[in-house]
Image (spheres, grey):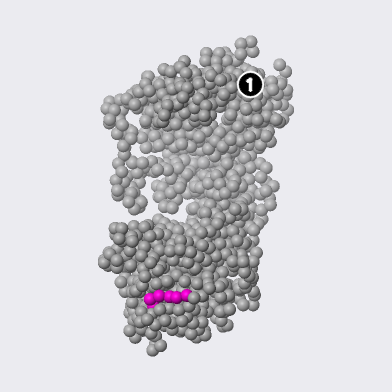
Amino acid sequence: MQLIRCPWCGPREEVEFHYGGQAGVAYPADPAALSDEDWARYVFVRDNPKGRFEERWSHAAGCRRWFTAVRDTATYRFER
Amino acid sequence: MSRVDGYGRIDRTRTLTFTFDGAQYTGHPGDTLASALLANGVRRIGTSVKLDRPRGITAAWGEDPTGLVQIEEPFPEPMLLATTVDLVDGLVARGLGGRGRLAEVPDTARYDRRHTHCETLVVGAGPAGLLAARTAARRGDRVVLVDDRPAAGGALLGTERICGRDALDFVADTIAELRADPDVRILPRTTAFGHYDDGFVLALERRTDHLAEPPRNVSRQRVWRIRAGHVVVATGAHERPVVVEDNDRPGIMLAASARDLLHRYGVRVGREIVVFTTDDAAHGAAADLEAAGARVTVVDPRPGAGGSATRQAQVVGTRSDAEDGAVTAVTLDDGTVLPCDTLLLSGGWNPTAHLFSHVRGALRYDAELGAFRPGEPLDGVTVVGAANGTFDLAGCLAEGRGETPEPVARTTRVVWRTEGDPARQFVDLQRDSTVADIARAVGAGMRSVEHVKRYTTIGTAHDQGRTSGVIASGITAELLGVPVESLGTTTFRPPYTPVAFAALAGRERGRLYDPERTTALHAWHVEAGAVFEDVGQWKRARYYPRPGEDMEAAVLRECAAARTGVGILDGSTLGKIDVQGPDAGVLLDRIYTNLMSSLKPGRVRYGVMCGVDGMVIDDGTVLRLDEDRFLVYTTTGGAAPILDHLEEWLQTEWPELRVSLTSVTEQWATFPVVGPRSRDVIGAFAPHVDVSNAAFPFMSWLDTEVDGVPVRLARISFSGELAWEVSVDGWHAAAVWQRLLDLGAPYAITPYGTETMHVLRAEKGYPIIGQDTDGTVTPQDLGMDWVVSKKKPDFVGRRSFARPANLDPLRKQLVGLLPVDPDLRLPEGSQIVELTDALPPPPVPMLGHVTSSYRSAALGRTFALALVKGGHARIGERLTVPVGEALVPVEVTGSVVFDPEGTRRDGEPGVH
Amino acid sequence: MESPVSTETLRPTGALDGWAGRFAELPDSVALLAEPFHAMVDVRTADPAALEGLVGAPLPGPNAWTGGERVTAIRLGPDEWLLTSPFLAPPELEAAARAAGAAALPGARVAVADVSAQRTTVRLRGAHARDVLETGCAIDLHPRSFGAGSAAVTLLGQAGVVLLGLGPSDYRVLVRSSFAAYLAEWLLDAAREFR
C-alpha cells in the first residue's frame, strides 16, 4: 500500500486516490476543426513510458482535489 | 520417550493430551505439535505428495519443508506445519500425504486487522533485533517489535552469555525495558509476511491458538498493517542441508533444528546420531546432543574440523530397515556404513533476507557463505545480524546497536550435494523435486533459475524454498558450468509464510463484507415487508409483496396502481449535485449534450451526459434553483462517478469557471408520487399550492413549506403518468413519507419498488444507463437525437458523433421487442438473430441482445427493450430470440410501447 | 374528495435512531453516542477570513478543525470548509453563512450549501476509542499526530468519514447518512474485543 502525497492533506494510502491518467493532455481548442484521426488520438491515445510520467490523481476519499504528480512507472516512486 | 531432564522451557508440571493419526499422546505447555510428537518417538508424519515416500520433521520451525499436518480439532485446518502449531489440550491432528482438506463448516473464529504507525519497526527479536529495538526506543522512537515465536531470543539457546549475563536473562531484561515504554509495542507470535512500499509491512499475529480457552471476543488472528519510518530486518538465518542420496527419510533433520529442539523443548531427537556438516555450527549441536546423552558421530570433510573424533568424510546415502521408514544407517564416501537413528545435516546458513527482497532489495551471492545476502542498501531499511550474513553473537549485537562488527573468518565449505543417484537426491522435499529434475530442466534448455524453479516447482511449496532455494541455484550453476553469482536467485515475494484467507478478509465478512447503504426510509421498508435489491451498495426496496404474492403478482399490482390510481416510490438514492456559481450554466452546457443555461429558474430539464467518446455515461433531470445555482440529479450508480467526472473537467480543464460542486445525495430524500390520482395527494399534502396543470405545469418545480418544513415539489415523470417528485431534507424524510401515505390512503396509494419503476419506465422507452446501455451507446442509438443540441458549438462528446463509426447505420440501436406469444417473457441478456426456423451452423450472426424485459400490466402482455443492429430501420420486422432450445419469434417496435403520444402526462382527462 | 387531517407534526428522525440500545451496551472504554441534528453547511471560498466572524476564530488550515462557541469549522479542502452547529437550525446556519459570505472580498465568491442531512455524527470516546478506530483507519492516530483539533477526511472501514480529534480518547465521526448504519454496525463489531 503506497503512500501518495496529496498537496492539501499530506500523505495518505493509495486507496484514497483515483487515477486520472496522463497529465497535460489539453482538451482541443476547437474539436470540430480536428480530423477524425487527430480527434481519435486525443480521445484514445496516451503515452505509456517506462520511467518518469506526469499523471493526474484525485484525492477521491479526501479533499476531492485533482493534482498532478510525477511518478516513475517502473519503480512506482513519486517524485516529491 | 526422548524428553531429557534439565532441558527446555516447557512447563513439565502440566500435561496436555492430544491425538495424532488416531493415537493419543501427551505433551506439555510450551510444546509445539512437532516437539511433542518427537518427544513421543513419532518420527513419520506423512507421505510425500508425488512419490508417497515417508516423511518426518526436518526442521524445528517455519522452514520445515516436510512436517505438514491436517488439524481436525479444535477447528479443521489444512496444511499447517507441526513445528508451528502450539500444542493445546485436545488437539487432534493427522499427517498428510501432501494435500489437506478445507473445513466444511463455517469458521466462527474472529479475524481482524489493526493499523499502527511507528518510527522504527524491528522484525525479529533475536539478539540483533532486540538491540535494534532498544536502541530505537532509547532515542525516543515509537517502536514496533514483531517476532514470529512465542518468546523473544531468536536463535539463542540459553547457553550463551551477553554483557556478562546469561543470554536469556539479558533477553528478559531487554524485553522488560521495552515493555515499560508506552511507545513500544511488542508483538510475539507475529510473522511479518510482506514488506511493501513506503515502510509498509503486513504481519500476522496468532492471538489465541495457544490458549486453552480462547476468549470469544478476541480475534484468533490479526493482520497488523504497520507503517514504519524505518524497517529493521533482523530475521536471522536458516540452516541449509547438504543434499545426499535418500535424504528425505524421517529421522533426517537440520543440525541446528535438533539443537533447538533440545534447548527449547527438552527433546533429544535421537540416541545414535550422525552429524554430517561442512560448517562449524553443527559441531556445537553435536556436543550439546552428546552432553544430553546421545551417541554422536560427526562427519565433516574439512581437514582439521572438529575434534579428533570427527571423521573426515562425506555422507553419500542413507538406509532404512525401520517400519516407519526412518533412517537406520548412513553410508560414507569411503564405503563405511554407520548405524544410526538420526542423521543431522548442515551445509551452512542462508540469511533470511525475504523482507529486504520484497521491496526490491538486491541480493548478492557471497561465495564464502554459499548464500545470498543483502547487497546495495535501501533507503529506510536496515538488515542486521544473521539476516545480513553476520552469524557471530558479538557481530549481531553490534549490528543491532547500529555499529559495524569486527570481521570474522569464515570456515564454511560450500557443498551443495555429495555423490549419488540424482533421482534420489531431494532438493525440495515438499515438492518431491530432485537433482535429476534440475538436470532435466537444464537439459531442456532452461538457463535462468526462475525458469528452473517453474519447471521443477522447487521453492513453490509452503516454505517457499527456505532451505532448498540456494541449493537449487548452486546445483543449477554447477550443471550449467557457470558461477552461482551470475545465475542469481529467484525473487522472494510476499507472503513469507502462508496466510489464511480468513485473516486477510478480517472483519469484512457477512454484513460488513461490503457496506450496505440505506435511505432514510430503510426501517419503514423493512417494516413494510419489502424485498430488497442491491443497486451498487444501496439496499433498495424492489417490491412489497402482499401475502401470497410472488414478484410478478406484486409488480403487476404496483404497476396497475401507478397507472390507474397513485403509487409512491423511495427515489432517494438518486445522486444529487449542487452546482453553484456564476458559471454554473456554462459548465453544464459543456457537460450535457443539451442546453442547460437556457433553463429558467423554477423549471426542470432532462439531460444526457456523454464521455469524450460520445457514449452515454449518465442521464437525469436538472432543476435550475436560481440564476447561479442548479441541482443536478444523476442515476443512483452515477452519484459518485459523475461528481468525479464534473470535478475532473472543472478542476483540470476549466479552472477558470466560477463554479462549486457539492454532493447533496443524502441531504435530499426524493419520493415520486405517480399516477392519475397524484394530484389529489399532492394537493392535500400542500393545500396552499395550486397543483393545476396551468399553475404547476410539467417540468416545473417550487419550494414550499409543510408544517414549517421546507419541501420541494417538482412535476417530473419517469413513468409517463401525471407525477410529482416530493423532496425533503433527510431529517424529515420518514415523516413526510408517512404523511403522503396517510393522505394517499383514500386513493389507495401504493408504495412501489424499483421493479415496478423499471417496468413503468421501460413501457415508455426510458433507458436505464448501465442496463440498456453499456458504454458503447450514443444518444442517437437510444433514439434521442432530440437531446443533442444542434446550437451549442461544443460539449463533451460532440466531436465523436461525427466519427465514421458513430455514423454507421448498422450500429446497435434501442428498440422495443414484442414476443409473438404475449405471455412469453424473454430472459434479459438473450441474443437476437435473424428470423429463422432453425439456427444455421455456428458462428451464428448476432444482431444484438435483450437489455430489459418485463410483463406489462398496462399492455396485458410481455415486452422487452433491446439493442439491435440497425434496429431503428427494422421496426416492424420479425426477428428470432433463441431461448434455451426454443426459437422465439419477436416483432421489433419503437422503444415506446405504452402511450407513445404522451397523453397521460397531465393526468387522465376527466380527473381534474 | 375529503382528505384526512394529519394532526402530527413532521418530526425529524436521525439516521441512527434505534441504535441507542445497542450503543448503551458498550462499556465506558468504548462509548458510542449518536449526535443527530447538527446543522451543517458546506462553504467554498477563496476568502475564508469573511467567515471568521461567524465561526469566532480563523478558519482552520489543513487537517484541522476549529470550534467557536456556536459554530465549528472543519477544513475539507483547500477552499472548502464544513460549518457545523448543534444550536442553529439548518436554514439559520445557511443564512448566516450566506450573510457572512456577502462581506467577502470582491471576486472571492462564497458558495454555501445546506448539507445538514448529508452526514450524521457519532461520538466515540473511552480508553479504547483509538484501538477501535485503528482497526479500520490508516492514518496515524497517535495523540502526537492526531490530537484535539485534528481533522481528517479519510476512510474508516469502508466508509468515507470526517474524523475529528476532540481530546485524548475522544473523537467525533461524521459519516454519510446512508453509511451510518454500516458504520454503527462496524464500530459495534470493532468494539467487541473490549466488552
- The majority secondary structure of the magenta stretch comes to strand
- Crowding at dot 1, Cα within 10 Å, few <14 / some 14-19 / many 20+, comes out as many
Please state if B165 lies on the left or on the right of B92 as rendered: left
Residue at 65% x, 24% y is B557
Q: Name the residue beneath numbered marker 1.
A: B560
Point out residue B616 in the picture as x, y percentages from the top left corner. 43, 28
Please state if B868 lies on the left or on the right of C160 as rendered: left
Rendered view: C184 above or below B894:
below
Q: Between B452 and B201, which is closer to the camera in this rendering? A: B452
Residue at 47% x, 45% y is A62
Point out residue B282 in the picture as x, y percentages from the top left corner. 42, 79
Q: Between B93 and B9, which is closer to the camera in this rendering? A: B93
Point out residue B822 in the picture as x, y percentages from the top left corner. 57, 20
Residue at 40% x, 88% y is B309
Task: Say whether residue B145 is magenta.
Answer: no
Is residue B189 visible to the viewer in this orientation of the structure? Answer: no
Q: Which amino acid does label 1 sit on?
A: Ala
Q: Between B346 and B355, which is closer to the camera in this rendering? A: B346
Q: Mark 1 lies on which chain?
A: B
Please state if B355 lies on the left or on the right of B570 as rendered: left
